[in-house]
Amino acid sequence: MNSRALTLLVTLLVGLIALTGCSTDNNEHQRLVTEADLLNGGSPLIVAGVNLNGTPADPADDFVPIEFLMIEFSARALNNNMVIPENGTYSTFNITHYDLVWIPGPGAPAALTSYNVTGASLTVSVPVNDRAEASILVGDIAMKGEAWFPGSAFTANLELTFYGHESSSEYEVAIHAGTTVQFIATVSE
């Protein structure tokens, strides 16, 4: 084999090896694995039109609640052999924004999807081997003023995608989570 053919073969092999390592999924670049561990403390989320506040006979203490979904994020090293010093490079995962998508269930109004959110700001820093909490608004006053809310009780799925990156990194990562939400007319304490 002449040197020209050998050089071409080596160049081709190096190119193929480089291509097999490329991916549009940037998670392999992350030293931290971040997860949305706990949604609403493990409790079901209820979105209610009115809170009767203990005495259904007295409407003076009733109010329209706004509901927030609590999320607990955790971050850990990619594997047990990796040591990431606290307060060092790549030691924190920074969540910067999120998308919220409603998927109406049976009996749910299709108009619920008009309350989908794209690119909403959220600032959460999750240190390595630690947890951080955040809350996002899912049941606001405007939603409860709609003619369809609540015609009858219904259920919808809520899909969340949180976006962020490791400190000292520009690679954006998506973290997916979701829960089921029950919509009802009234709730009592």
Image (cartoon, helix red, strand yellow):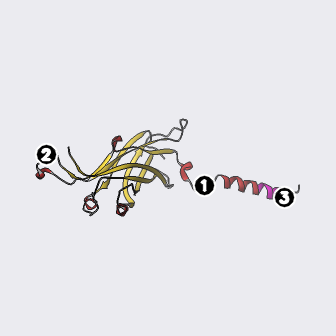
Would you call the spot at circle 3 few (<14 residues within 10 Å), some (14-19), or many (20 or more)?
Answer: few
Residue at x-position 35% and y-position 57%: 108
> How much space separates mark 3 and mark 1, taking CA atoms?
29 Å
The mark nearer the N terminus, 3 or 1, is: 3
Report the magenta stretch's main SS: helix
Residue depth check, mark 1 versus mark 2: number of the one nearer the observer: 2
Q: Amino acid at mark 2?
A: Thr
Disc 1: which residue: 23
Would you call the spot at circle 2 few (<14 residues within 10 Å), some (14-19), or many (20 or more)?
Answer: few
Q: Is residue 105 above or below residue 92?
A: below
Q: Amino acid at mark 3?
A: Ala
Q: Amino acid at mark 1?
A: Ser
Secondary structure of the residue carrying numbered label 3: helix
Q: Is residue 35 above or below residue 107?
A: above
> How much space separates mark 2 and mark 3, taking CA atoms?
88 Å
What range is drawn magenta here? 4-11
Disc 3: which residue: 5
